[in-house]
Structure formats: C-alpha cells, structure tokens
Amino acid sequence: MTTEAVQRGSDWLNQAGLRPTRQRVALAALLVGDGKHRHFTAESLFAAAQAEGESVSLATVYNTLRAFCDVGLIQEVTVDGSRSYFDTNTHDHPHFFWEDEGHLTDAPSEELVISKLPNAPEGAEIASVDVVIRLRRK
C-alpha cells in the first residue's frame, strides 16, 4: 500500500470524525486510496486486506464497515436478504446488479426517471428510494 493511499484513507476517516486506528486506516486506504469509488462486499474487502498482508479479521471488517456506514462514509446497498454490497459513492444514484457475476455497478442517473411514488402511510415519511436494476447476460 502506498503512502499516498494511507494518507488519503486517514484523511477520509478524519473528515468523518472517526478515530484512525491502524485497521481502519488500512481498510480505508484499500477503499479510497486510489481516489476512485468502488462497490464491494465485506468478504471482498477482507480478501483484499489479506492480499495486502493486513492483519484484520472478518469480524473487524464487518464492524468497521458498520462504523463507516454510521458516519456516512459509505452506503449499504441491499440486493437481496442474503448479501449486502457497499459503495463509497454516497450520493443518490441507481445500481445495476449483474446476477450472473454477482457484482454491482453504477447505473446512469441521468437516464432514470421516477415520476410518482406512493404516499407514505400515516405517521411515516419516505427517507430514501433505492433503485437496483437486476441484469443477466443474454
């Protein structure tokens, strides 16, 4: 891992007010160290950390991702009840889920038009709308 990636990860944590522990910095550097957004699972982040020689447990990865979500650094994208994906791009945008390969990509926001939503039930308000478009190869 480059010094620049580690610095970018540390800065990312600091801007959210998260204490930059060694493990958080290592995971943050993997996520934002190159300055690009990415989609990932806890398992894929754990594998990337292991490949870099980082000493983190899968439980630590899950706990760290929860902390990152709680402060708004990443968003969780639920594709089905059995697997969660995470995205470093926290702006509202739709996703494609590639069923055959099991991965998530951004869908073009400018092509999505939602013309009407149902009214929220009495005593509730709509907090957000998540759009996941499932794809499979022909």
Image (cartoon, helix red, strand yellow):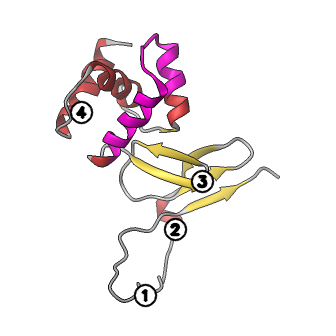
Q: Residues within 10 Å of mark 3 (few under 14, many from 20)?
A: some
Callout 1: SS: loop
Task: Point out the residue furthest to the right here.
Answer: 138
Q: Secondary structure at mark 2?
A: loop
Judged left or right of residue 112, residue 92 is left
x then y, percent, for residue 123: 32, 85
- Residue 66, percent across and down? 37, 42
Label 4: how many residues lie within 10 Å, few (<14), some (14-19) or many (20+)? many
Give the number of callouts: 4
Q: Earlier in the sequence, mark 3 or mark 4?
A: 4
Query: Which residue is label 2 attached to?
Result: 112
Residue type beneath disc 3: Phe
Name the front one of labels 2 and 1.
1
- Cβ–Cβ under 8 Å for marks 1 and 4: no
Q: Residues within 10 Å of mark 2 (few under 14, many from 20)?
A: few
State if disc 3 and disc 1 touch (CB < 8 Å).
no
Please name the predominant secondary structure of the magenta segment in the image. helix
Which residue does the numbered mark 3 point to in the structure image? 96
Residue corresponding to mark 1: 119
Q: Earlier in the sequence, mark 1 or mark 3?
A: 3
Earlier along the polypeptide chain: callout 3 or callout 2? Answer: 3
Nearer the observer: mark 3 or 2; the answer is: 3
Q: Is residue 22 inside the magenta stretch? A: no
For disc 4, the marked residue is 13
Is 67 above or below relative to 52?
A: below
The residues bearing labels 4 and 2 have C-alpha atoms spaced at a distance of 32 Å
